[in-house]
Image (spheres, helix red, strand yellow):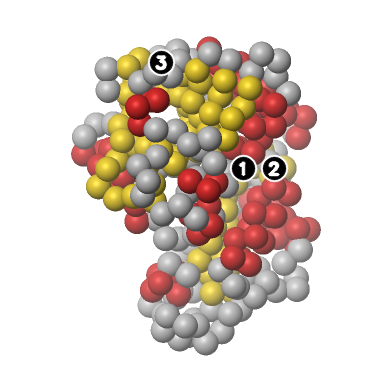
């Protein structure tokens, strides 16, 4: 079942048409969230990012779009889908109302909440999996504010996903127009070299990820580790001790191979333990 503007509908219900601006122009933003046992993880961070994204796209924010209102609608949808006591993935999509061409006639919004069950209540690392990545160089991310938000304009990510599948890679790393590594196709990138962990700055076109923010905080409180928000060149990838990718659904995904380079996962495992400790507290 799906929640459309506060009304929970059957999956077969027809409630969108060809005039939808998210379909026509990518005029939409979204949040991907994780919930466990009726608790939305890092909800305040997600809510604040959603509000910031809507302001960047000049959408009118409805008065009822409070943190409490949207959380209640998410929890209602989880309950209707009978996953409110389980671990679940949620997608909250906000798109501008129908009308207009490039210039909208109405800056108001509609929203959709979708849910699906996840298997594990905590973040896990598959230690046996050889997770291999490659650079995607067919198209580039433009550095700037629009690249930091989760909008429906994801053509580069889609094409990188197809490239990875066709060439039997598990993921691709995306470059910006200055040929710096900005992110992975489905999350933020962290590079470990000695006691220093680097992650691309938002100004390089990296997504303003929720798990990115949480890991920056965890690393900042970890002895013997230093966090740098700094550009990463492709050359640095093969000099790194570890690479890992973060998103709110998978947590930390250690990269095991890039070209001829193979990586360790010791720092990834340690940080994952600290991340799961936060998840337990939230639960």
Residue 9: image tag = none
Residue 256 picture location, percent across and down: 38, 19
Q: Residues within 10 Å of mark 1 (few under 14, many from 20)?
A: many
- The residue at which mark 3 appears reads as 263
Of helix, strand and loop, which one carries label 2?
loop
Q: Residues within 10 Å of mark 3 (few under 14, many from 20)?
A: many
Up/down of 11 relative to 186, above or below: below
Residue 210: image tag = 1
Residue 75 picture location, percent across and down: 69, 53
Residue 148 picture location, percent across and down: 53, 52
71 horizontally vs 80: left or right: right
**Label 3 – label 2 distance at C-alpha:** 30 Å
Q: Nearer the viewer, residue 145 or 75?
A: 145
- The residue at which mark 2 appears reads as 42
Q: Are marks 1 and 2 in contact (CB under 8 Å)?
A: yes
Residue found 76% across the figure and 63% down from its top: 66
Residue found 52% across the figure and 87% down from its top: 105
Of helix, strand and loop, which one carries label 3?
loop
**Label 1 – label 3 distance at C-alpha:** 25 Å
* Residue lying at the far left of the rendered structure: 166
Q: For residue 172, say whether it is visible.
A: yes
**Label 1 – label 2 distance at C-alpha:** 8 Å
Residue found 69% across the figure and 32% down from its top: 217
């Amino acid at each position: 079942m799906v929640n459309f503007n506060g009304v929970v509908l059957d999956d077969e219900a027809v409630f969108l048409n060809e005039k939808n601006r998210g379909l026509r122009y990518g005029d939409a933003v979204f949040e991907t969230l994780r919930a466990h046992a009726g608790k939305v993880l890092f909800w305040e961070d997600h809510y604040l990012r959603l509000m910031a994204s809507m302001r960047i796209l000049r959408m009118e924010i409805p008065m009822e779009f409070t943190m409490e209102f949207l959380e209640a609608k998410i929890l209602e949808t989880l309950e209707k889908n009978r996953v409110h006591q389980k671990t679940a993935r949620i997608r909250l999509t906000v798109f501008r109302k129908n009308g207009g061409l490039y210039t909208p006639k109405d800056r108001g919004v509609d929203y959709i909440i979708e849910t699906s069950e996840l298997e594990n209540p905590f973040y896990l690392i598959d230690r046996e999996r050889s997770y291999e990545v490659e650079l995607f160089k067919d198209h580039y991310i433009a550095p700037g504010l629009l690249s930091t938000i989760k909008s429906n304009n994801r053509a580069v990510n889609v094409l990188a996903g197809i490239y990875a599948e066709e060439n039997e890679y598990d993921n691709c790393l995306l470059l910006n127009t200055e040929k710096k590594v900005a992110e992975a196709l489905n999350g933020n990138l962290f590079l470990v070299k000695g006691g220093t962990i680097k992650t691309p700055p938002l100004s390089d076109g990296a997504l303003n990820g929720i798990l990115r923010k949480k890991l920056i905080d965890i690393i900042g409180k970890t002895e013997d580790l230093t966090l740098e928000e700094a550009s990463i060149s492709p050359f640095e990838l093969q000099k790194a001790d570890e690479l890992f990718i973060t998103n709110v659904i998978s947590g930390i995904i250690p990269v095991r191979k890039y070209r001829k380079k193979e990586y360790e996962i010791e720092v990834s495992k340690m940080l994952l333990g600290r991340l799961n400790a936060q998840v337990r507290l939230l639960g």
